Image (spheres, helix red, strand yellow):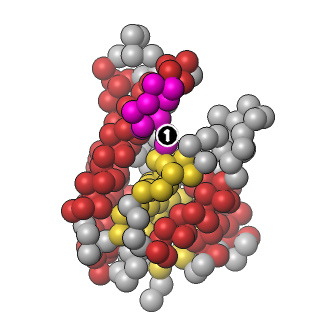
Amino acid sequence: MAKTILVCGYGPGISSAVAKKFGAEGFSVALVARSKETLAAGAAALEGAGIKARAFPADLTNPEAVKKLVADVRRDLGPITVIHWNAYAATGGDLMTATAADLRVPFDVSVTGLVMAVQSALPDLKEQKESAVLVTGGAFAFYDPNVDAMAVQWASMGVAIGKAAQHKAVALLAEKLKGQVYVGEVVVAGTVKGTRFDSGKATLEAADIANQFWQLYRERSRPTVTFG
């Protein structure tokens, strides 16, 4: 049976590497982000490598847009086997100046959109063999004074809050869907080469993280692993 991976929050780095890895393993790939240009280039590159890929521009903070996205992917590529949630938002960087709207966005991207995607794709996920929800986590989620100091210094407080909430959401989804759909995350503890956060000192390779996702997917046992 054909398999489809829905890659949400597509861009250079982890999501691109995951799309290539799963595509090389026989998955059709649905790429999702706001930028039509980024998606078109990504889909073209995958198609050039012999991987079936389609672009689906969408606002992942909008629950109705997420529901429509799942329906569109199912229509164009067939039932969804894997959701890879890689989306994040960088608003609300300073809690002393952030607006209420700024603070809602990281939560909506990291948690609300993820949950809506899982709900919408759940019939497919339950029917597909070896289905999964795979989430890109971040070490900003951890309760640690050094991590907190870094989030403040980097004006990434909104991201930290969103990732902390997402970390708990992954654990809850894993428990709720145990025995039905595998749910797991790779918590990235470091900077990935070639991403917007790379100032030239990044140490992590996106391809290595993609391989970690593939390993988690095949093992289907651990709900979370820290990489870096």
- Magenta-colored span: 138-147
Seen from the viewer's position, the closer of residues 180 and 143 is 143
Q: What is the x, y in percent for residue 63?
A: 29, 47
In the drawing, does residue 19 fall left or right of residue 66? right
**Count of all numbered marks drawn on residues in the image:** 1
Whether residue 146 is in magenta: the answer is yes
At which x and y percent is residue 6? 46, 64
Q: Which residue is mark 1?
A: 139
Three-letter code, disc 1: Ala
The residue shown at (75%, 35%) is 201
163 in relation to 5, above or below? above
- Residue 52, position in %: x, y? 60, 74
Q: Nearer the viewer, residue 62 or 133?
A: 133
Q: Is residue 12 above or below residue 50?
A: above
> Do we see residue 127 in this rendering?
yes
Name, please, the residue furthest toward the right: 200
**Which of the pair 21/113 is nearer the observer?**
21
Q: Quadrant of residue 94?
A: top left
